[in-house]
Image: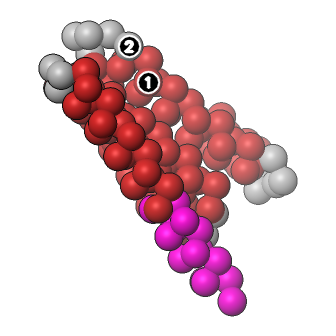
Amino acid sequence: MAYALHLRLRGASEFAPVFEHFAANLAALGAFALMTDDDARLAGCTAGIALSAAVVAWGFRTRRELFVIYGFLYGVVALDVLLIDLVDDDGFAFLLVIVSMIASIAVLFAIHARLRQGER
């Protein structure tokens, strides 16, 4: 809402990206806050994954790598929290987190290469 008001009163400016970063991080923070409550964890994880997908899509559409990274990493955290909550065996949950981190590194390299390829 503040961003829309800012655009209406002053037009686009150099400060607009700050609003965009703030909105992406605030949305993730809200989802993470829901994940801390046992009763709302599923809703928080679902919201986190959905918001992450939206941030990634917006980042690709605007060709802004930092938003793609935000969205992807926030989505991985939400997915890991959901998987840890669903798995009863701590050892298996640990293995899932390790595998997701290794996969995340590979995907981040691929995302970086894809966005850099588009710059040429």
Q: Are marks 1 and 2 in contact (CB under 8 Å)?
A: yes
The residue to which callout 1 is attached is: 32
* Residue at image mark 2: 36
List x then y, in percent, for residue 34: 37, 18
Is-magenta flag for residue 114? yes
Residue drawn at 55 percent across, 47 percent down: 70
Q: Nearer the viewer, residue 118 or 18?
A: 118
Left or right relative to 48: residue 118? right
The three-letter code of the residue at mark 2 reads: Thr
User: Where residue 66 appears, x then y in whole percent?
Assistant: 64, 55
Secondary structure, magenta segment, majority class = helix
**Label 1: which secondary element:** helix
Q: Quadrant of residue 80?
A: top left
Q: Which residues are magenta?
A: 107-120
Q: Residue furthest front?
A: 91
Give the class, few, some or many, for how many residues have Cα within 10 Å of label 2's Cα (few <14, many ≥20): few
For the question of whether residue 68 can be seen, the reply is yes
Q: Secondary structure at mark 2?
A: loop
